[in-house]
Image (cartoon, rainbow, N blue to C red):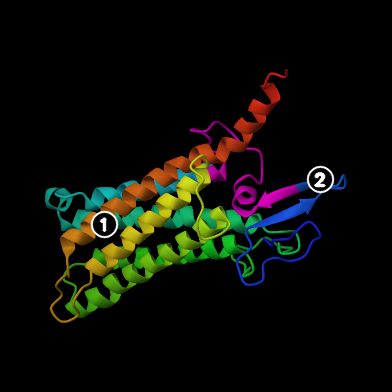
Amino acid sequence: MAGQDHSGRDLSIGAPATFVDHMRPDGSVVRLESRRHRKHQKPAAGSTWWAPRARGWWIAILFAIGSLLFALGSVPGYASAVGARWDTVTYFTGSLFFTAASFLSYREAVDASPPGLNPARRRFFVYQPGRIDWWATAVQFVGTLYFNVSCGVAMAASLSAQAAHQHVWRPDAIGSACFLVSSVLSWYETCHGWAAWRPASWSWWITLLNLVGSIAFGISAVAGYINPVSGQVHNAARADTQTLIGAICFLIGAILLLPERTEETRNEASARFAPHG
């Protein structure tokens, strides 16, 4: 989304644009924020907690389930209770939910693109490098695919040290890096800069939690380094702890997507029925 001042000059040079100031025919100026525009393309369908016909509702639910499974897989004692095989299955299943939610988020960003950027024919994948929300959702989606590979290969029995390093740890590290980059971009998009204090905003809390969760996943990837010679994990306990922290942050952030989805509707209703005096 290009950033413009009242006269229409482009403000996106040198920094990602996160809003557009649109001048109405009556001379009033309306600020269209990138994330708000993306999340509220259509009036919110259903209620805050139950809206299976709404894409935003599914994004929240799928992310929440994926986060819950990652948290479960990293809980101390879970692997011992169910066995290493089912622990890896738990992670892999969670990664699939992450991928489904991330793809819907990516499509949400693509569908929110300006008319001039929208392809005449609906395509699953498009290239829109001039938009920060496109980058944030596309990079996140790529990260989930790497998690699919890492978690999927980890289910195989009797992996060699080299194979575990190459096909389990490395995709996990790349996926974690993608999540961190995506979270930083989303944070910048929401704050319209590198820092802001907006505790009254659902978006601010969501992107903050996702950023903290991505940092925890990054630490987990470093701690979970697999030696390609010995096959030993650098610090398995720390890797599990940081994965648990990150997954809990993602879970809370996913749940907060639900009230964020309907906040426009609630605000309009409040304004409509507010007493006038």
Q: Residue drawn 16% across and 53% down?
A: 79
Residue 31 locus on image (x, y percent): 70, 49
Q: Residue drawn 51% across and 52% down?
A: 196
Q: Secondary structure at mark 2?
A: loop
The image quadrant that residue 254 belongs to is: top left
Question: Which amino acid, mark 2?
Answer: Ser
Residue 18 locus on image (x, y percent): 62, 58
> Which residues make up the magenta segment?
30-56
Above or below, 212 relative to 205: below
Query: Visible in this render: residue 152?
Result: no
Residue 122 locus on image (x, y percent): 67, 60
- In the image, which disc is placed on residue 28? 2
Q: Secondary structure at mark 1?
A: helix
Q: Residue drawn 62% across and 51% down?
A: 38
Query: Visible in this render: residue 171?
Result: yes
Question: Which amino acid, mark 1?
Answer: Gln
- In the image, which disc is placed on residue 169? none
Q: CA distance from mark 1 to mark 2?
A: 48 Å
Does residue 58 appear to the left or right of 44 in the view shown?
Answer: left
| Label 2 crowd (10 A; few <14 / some 14-19 / many >=20) | few
Nearest the viewer among 156 and 119 is: 119
Q: Quadrant of the C terminus?
A: top right
Q: Can you identify the residue that label 1 sits on? A: 242
